[in-house]
Amino acid sequence: MTELKGWNRDQMAARAAEELQDGWYVNLGIGIPTLVANYVGDKDITLQSENGMLGMGPFPFEGDEDPDLINAGKQTITELKRTAYFDSATSFGMIRGGKIAAAILGAMEVAENGDLANWMIPGKLVKGMGGAMDLVAGVGRVIVVMDHTNKHGESKVLKSCTLPLTGQGVVNRIITNLGVLDVVEGGLRIVACADGVTEDELRAATEATIV
């Protein structure tokens, strides 16, 4: 299969930022989702990090980094005038209590029924499962942002996941470098194709059922 480019990481993050609505509290997972902070713009969005920060700004310019200000992925970030800090227990209380409107997460696999696998690969060293299992169970909407295929060109949007699950039936929308897909009854529905990618090419790169 010819490799399809579509959107790059920043374009995927910008597309994910379009999903966010004024007044939402939003959690960003590690990887591509952290870039969403750079594309919130003038929207009234409050970004939450499970390591204890509410009100994250964009990434700092080189030379302006503060090593005490990091997100859950250990990347340096900036604070806002309204930023609040708290312990991890309070942070997870927000998540488990349904206070977070949406989570934008990376993934290794997503299934057509909304199953998500994003916390481990068997045989690989894993420091821990992080907050993903709590997030997918507690937030209002789960948006996955990831590459459509792996380094071997194999689809990561599957009929069923092969890796250990983070959550069952939890994903609402999938944004990849090839397009945007919604989890609906019977499979996935194409919302949009990435720039330069046709619907036929998107279908061909997807193992999951597209209805």
Image: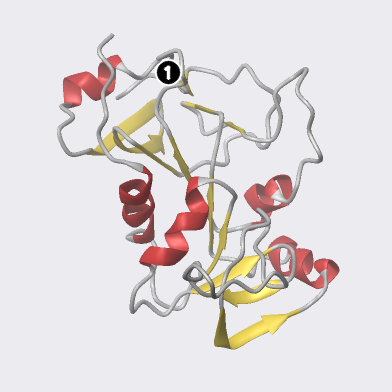
Q: Position of residue 89 (x, y in %)?
A: 84, 67
- Residue farthest toward the top in the current orientation of the protein: 1
Is residue 137 shown left or right of residue 35? right
Q: Position of residue 58 (x, y in %)?
A: 48, 70
Q: Evaluate whether residue 75 shows in this view.
A: yes
Is residue 78 shown left or right of residue 149? right
Q: Quadrant of residue 48?
A: bottom right
Q: How is the image coloured?
A: secondary structure
Above or below, comparing residue 150 to residue 23 in the picture? above
Which residue is painted at 15% across and 33% down in the image?
196
Instruction: Pick the residue in front: 81 or 140.
Output: 81
Is residue 177 shown left or right of residue 23? left
- Residue farthest toward the bottom in the current orientation of the protein: 81
Q: Position of residue 144 (x, y in %)?
A: 48, 43
Instruction: Pick the residue in front: 119 or 135.
Output: 119
Q: Quadrant of residue 206?
A: top left
Q: Quadrant of residue 211?
A: top left
Which residue is painted at 81% across and 39% down in the image?
127
Q: Position of residue 117 (x, y in %)?
A: 62, 31
